[in-house]
Image (spheres, helix red, strand yellow):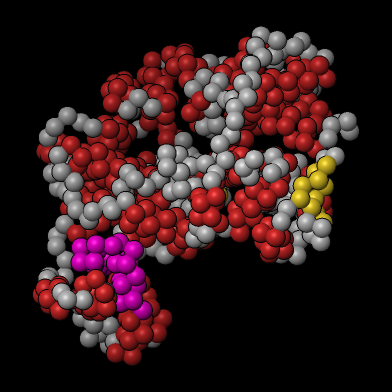
C-alpha cells in the first residue's frame, strides 16, 4: 500500500490519474465478460466509487489497476448471479469468469472498434470513444467541445443504446471489414485531434487537452495494431503537427501562419517521434494510404530548416496523389495552396475558383481565406480584403476571426464610401412595411447572399452571375417552393435597391403538391414515450400535433402571444390552439419567462450571428430555434421509429384527417 496519510485531495488526484490510465482496459475486459458496453461501464464506475470510498482511509493499493479490475469483476459476477435467464448456469459461469485473466491483450482494441462502429453517428462515436477509452467525464467532454453536458450525456446514452439494439459484437473484424472499420477508428481519433489543433469554435485557437488525448489514443492503437501502416501514419501525422503547437499562436492568441512561425520553437522530440512512426509505417509495407500521405507532407515541412527551404513541388505532388485517394473538396483546397506556393498564385487561384461552386465548401471559412492570400499575392488588394472579411464572418473561432479581420484591416479600404451588400440588406429588412414572418424569410435569403459573396461587396458590383452562383451552390437541391421563395426575395430586394432584376435568369420552378404521410397512432405513442427527450423538443412536437399548425407558424410564436388559460396563441391574423398534452408541458418550458421567442436555441449566438431583435430573448440572450435545427433533431430522434430508417419530418406530426 501507498502511505495512507496522503491528504484527501492527493488521493483524489491519484484516483483520477489511475482511472485515466486503466479505465479503457477495465471497461474492455468487462465488456468481454458481460457483452454489453453500457453495463460494463456501469460496473467499472461502481469500482471507481468503491475506490473513492475506501482509498482515502486504507491507502492506494500497490497495483491500483488490478484492484479496480478485481472489484469490477466481482460486480459482474454478482450481476450474472442475479440474472434470471442464467439461473441454472450462474454458478458455473461465475466460476469460469473469476478464473479468467484480468484482460486479454486485444480487449482494448475491441473496445476501440466497438466505440467507433459505423452504425453510430460521428458525434456519438467521438463522445463514446472519449468516455470509454479516454476516461473523460461527460462534463470534461462538454468543456472540450464547448457543448452542454446534457447533450454529451445524451450522445453517450444514445450510442450505447444503438450498439445494444443493433447487437454489435464485441470482437475484432476481419478481412475486408477490418480495413473499413479501422478507417472509422482512425477518422474518430483524427477528428478529436483536429478539434484540439484548430478549434472550430470558442475563444482559443487550440484545445491542447484534445490533442494530447488523441495522441494517447493513437499511440495506444499503434501498440495494439503494430502491423497496420495507416495507424503509424496517423500517429506520425499527429506527432509532427503537434510539434508546431508552441509556435502556432502569438502572445495575443492569434494564429501564426506556417511560413511565419519561429521554427526554433518546434518540439524536436515530437518531430523525432513523428519520423520514427513514419519509418514504422513504411516498414509495415503496402501502398501509402491517406494518413501516410498526409504524414509525408508533414515530414516535408519538418525537414525544412526555413520556410524558404520547403519543398513545395514535392508537397504539391503528394497532395495530387492524396486527392486521387481522398477526392474531398478540403484536400483539393490544400492542393491549391501547395500549387500556389510551388508554381505561383495564378495556378493556385485557378484551382480555388473551381471549388467555389462546391456546396460542401460554401460556409468553409478557409476557402475565402486561401483565396484572399492568393489575391493579395497577385496585387488584387481590395478583393483580398473582402475575402478576409468574409472568412472572418464564417469562422466560429474567435481567435481566427480576430486574425482574419486584422488582415483585412491592414489593407486600406476604398476612399470613396460605397453602399455595401450588408448595409443594403440591413436597410431593406428594417422597413416598416415588412411583417415579422416576411422579414425573417427575406433575411434568410440575404444572409446566404452575404455569407457567399461577403458583407463588404459593393452593392453596385452585384451581378446576376453571382446571384445565380449562390442559387446553384445553396439551393440547387431545394424543393421548388424553397427555390421560388428565395427567388422572390432577391427580386423584391433588387426592386427596392433600384437594381436590375438579378434573378430574371433564374426560372421559377413548378411546385407539385405532395401529400404528407402522417405518423400513425402507434408510433406517435412511442414518440411521446421516447427516453431522454429534452422538454423543448417534446413541447414543440406535441404542439405541432395538437394544433395542426404549420412548423414555421409554431416556431414564430412568442411568449407574449400565449393565452395559457384558453390554450391558444395569436399567430399573424389567426390563432394556434392546443390540448392538454401541450398545456402540461408549456408552463414547464416557460420557466417564468414573459417575453421573447417561445422556442429558444441551445445557446447564445456568437458575435457574427446576432439575430434580429424579434428573434432574440431579452431574458436569456438566446435566439429563436431555427426550422433547420428543429427538423434535424426530430429526424434524428425518430430514426428508430421509422421502418425506412430515415426518420420523420416535423410536417408528419399533423393529425390524420
* Count of numbered labels shown in the rendering: 0
Would residue 236 be visible to someone looking at this image? no
Question: In the figure, 108 relative to 85: above or below?
Answer: above
Whether residue 41 appears in magenta in the rendering, the answer is: yes
Q: Give the percent coordinates (x, y) of residue 18.
A: 29, 71
Which residue corresponds to the image point at 40% horizontal and 45% vertical from the top-left?
Answer: 122
* Residue nearest the observer in this picture, 462 or 601: 601
Rendered residue at 32%/67% (across/down): 39
Seen at 20% across and 66% down, the residue is 33
Q: Residue at x 47, y 20 (%)?
A: 355
Q: Main secondary structure of the magenta part?
A: helix
Q: Nearer the viewer, residue 274 or 524?
A: 524
The location of residue 150, given as percent across then percent down, is 52, 61
Q: Tell me the magenta residue range.
A: 20-49
Q: Quadrant of the C terminus?
A: top right
Residue 44 on the magenta span: yes
- Residue 551, located in which quarter of the rendered image? top right
- The spot of residue 611 in percent (x, y) is 72, 42
Compared across the picture, whether 323 is left or right of 177 comes to right
Question: Where does residue 321 sit, x and y in percent of width and height?
Answer: 28, 23
In the rendered structure, the answer to whether residue 390 lies left or right of residue 197 reads right
Splitting the image into 4 quarters, where does residue 309 fall?
top left
| Up-down relation of residue 248 to residue 169 (above or below) | above
Identify the image quadrant of the N terminus.
bottom left
Judge left or right: residue 82 versus residue 503.
Answer: left
Q: Among all residues in the image, which is located at the extreme right?
A: 432
As rendered, which of 249 and 292 lies closer to the eye?
A: 292
Q: Is residue 452 above or below residue 151?
A: above
Residue 543 in sight from this viewpoint: yes
Amino acid at each position: 500500500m501507498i502511505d495512507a496519510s496522503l491528504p484527501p485531495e492527493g488521493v483524489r488526484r491519484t484516483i483520477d490519474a489511475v482511472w485515466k490510465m486503466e479505465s479503457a482496459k477495465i471497461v474492455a475486459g468487462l465488456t468481454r465478460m458481460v457483452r454489453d458496453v453500457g453495463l460494463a461501464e456501469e460496473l467499472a464506475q461502481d469500482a471507481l466509487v468503491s475506490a473513492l470510498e475506501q482509498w482515502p482511509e486504507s491507502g492506494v493499493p500497490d497495483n491500483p489497476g488490478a484492484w479496480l479490475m478485481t472489484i469490477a469483476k466481482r460486480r459482474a459476477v454478482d450481476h450474472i448471479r442475479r440474472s434470471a435467464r442464467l439461473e441454472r448456469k450462474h454458478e458455473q459461469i461465475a466460476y469460469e469468469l473469476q478464473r479468467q485473466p484480468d484482460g486479454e491483450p486485444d480487449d482494448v482494441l475491441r473496445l476501440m472498434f466497438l466505440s467507433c462502429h459505423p452504425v453510430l453517428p460521428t458525434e456519438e462515436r467521438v463522445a463514446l470513444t472519449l468516455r470509454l477509452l479516454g476516461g473523460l467525464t461527460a462534463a470534461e467532454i462538454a468543456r472540450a467541445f464547448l457543448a452542454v453536458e446534457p447533450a454529451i450525456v445524451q450522445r453517450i446514452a444514445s450510442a450505447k443504446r444503438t450498439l445494444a439494439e443493433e447487437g454489435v459484437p464485441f470482437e475484432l473484424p476481419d478481412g475486408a471489414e477490418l480495413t473499413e472499420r479501422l478507417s472509422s477508428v482512425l477518422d474518430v481519433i483524427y477528428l478529436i485531434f483536429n478539434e484540439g489543433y484548430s478549434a472550430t469554435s470558442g475563444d482559443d485557437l487550440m484545445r491542447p487537452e484534445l490533442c494530447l488525448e488523441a495522441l494517447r489514443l493513437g499511440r495506444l492503437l499503434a501498440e495494439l495494431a503494430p502491423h497496420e501502416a495507416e495507424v503509424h501514419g496517423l500517429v506520425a501525422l499527429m506527432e509532427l503537427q503537434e510539434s508546431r503547437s508552441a509556435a502556432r499562436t502569438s502572445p495575443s492568441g492569434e494564429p501564426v501562419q506556417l511560413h511565419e512561425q519561429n521554427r526554433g520553437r518546434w518540439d524536436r522530440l515530437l518531430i523525432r517521434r513523428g519520423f520514427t512512426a513514419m519509418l514504422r509505417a513504411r516498414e509495415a509495407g503496402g501502398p501509402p494510404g491517406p494518413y501516410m500521405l498526409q504524414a509525408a507532407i508533414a515530414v516535408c515541412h519538418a525537414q525544412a530548416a526555413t520556410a524558404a527551404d520547403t519543398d513545395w513541388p514535392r508537397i504539391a505532388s503528394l497532395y495530387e496523389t492524396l486527392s486521387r485517394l481522398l477526392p474531398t473538396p478540403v484536400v483539393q483546397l490544400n492542393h491549391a495552396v501547395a500549387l500556389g506556393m510551388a508554381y505561383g498564385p495564378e495556378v493556385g487561384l485557378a484551382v480555388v475558383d473551381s471549388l467555389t461552386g462546391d456546396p460542401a465548401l460554401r460556409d468553409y471559412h478557409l476557402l475565402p481565406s486561401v483565396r484572399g492570400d492568393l489575391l493579395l499575392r497577385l496585387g488584387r488588394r481590395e478583393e483580398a480584403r473582402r475575402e478576409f472579411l468574409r472568412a472572418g464572418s464564417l469562422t466560429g473561432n474567435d481567435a481566427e476571426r480576430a486574425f482574419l479581420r486584422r488582415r483585412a484591416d491592414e489593407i486600406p479600404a476604398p476612399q470613396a464610401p460605397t453602399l455595401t451588400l450588408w448595409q443594403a440588406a440591413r436597410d431593406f429588412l428594417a422597413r416598416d412595411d415588412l411583417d415579422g414572418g416576411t422579414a425573417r424569410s427575406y433575411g434568410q435569403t440575404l444572409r446566404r447572399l452575404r455569407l457567399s459573396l461577403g458583407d463588404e461587396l459593393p452593392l453596385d458590383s452585384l451581378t446576376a452571375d453571382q446571384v445565380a452562383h449562390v442559387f446553384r451552390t445553396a439551393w440547387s437541391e431545394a424543393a421548388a417552393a424553397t427555390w421560388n421563395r428565395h427567388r422572390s426575395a432577391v427580386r423584391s430586394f433588387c426592386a427596392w435597391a433600384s437594381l436590375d432584376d438579378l434573378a430574371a435568369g433564374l426560372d421559377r420552378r413548378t411546385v407539385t403538391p405532395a401529400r404528407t404521410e402522417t405518423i400513425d397512432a402507434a408510433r406517435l405513442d412511442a414518440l411521446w414515450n421516447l427516453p431522454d427527450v429534452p422538454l423543448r423538443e417534446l413541447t414543440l412536437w406535441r404542439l405541432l400535433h395538437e394544433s395542426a399548425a404549420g412548423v414555421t407558424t409554431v416556431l414564430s410564436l412568442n411568449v407574449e402571444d400565449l393565452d395559457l388559460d384558453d390554450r391558444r396563441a395569436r399567430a399573424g391574423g389567426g390563432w394556434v390552439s392546443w390540448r392538454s398534452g401541450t398545456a402540461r408541458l408549456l408552463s414547464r418550458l416557460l420557466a417564468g419567462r414573459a417575453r421573447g421567442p417561445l422556442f429558444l436555441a441551445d445557446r447564445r449566438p456568437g458575435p457574427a450571428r446576432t439575430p434580429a431583435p424579434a428573434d432574440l430573448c431579452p431574458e436569456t440572450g438566446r435566439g429563436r430555434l431555427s426550422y433547420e435545427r428543429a427538423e434535424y433533431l426530430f429526424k434524428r430522434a425518430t430514426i428508430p421509429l421509422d421502418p425506412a430508417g430515415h426518420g420523420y419530418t416535423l410536417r408528419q406530426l399533423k393529425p390524420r384527417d
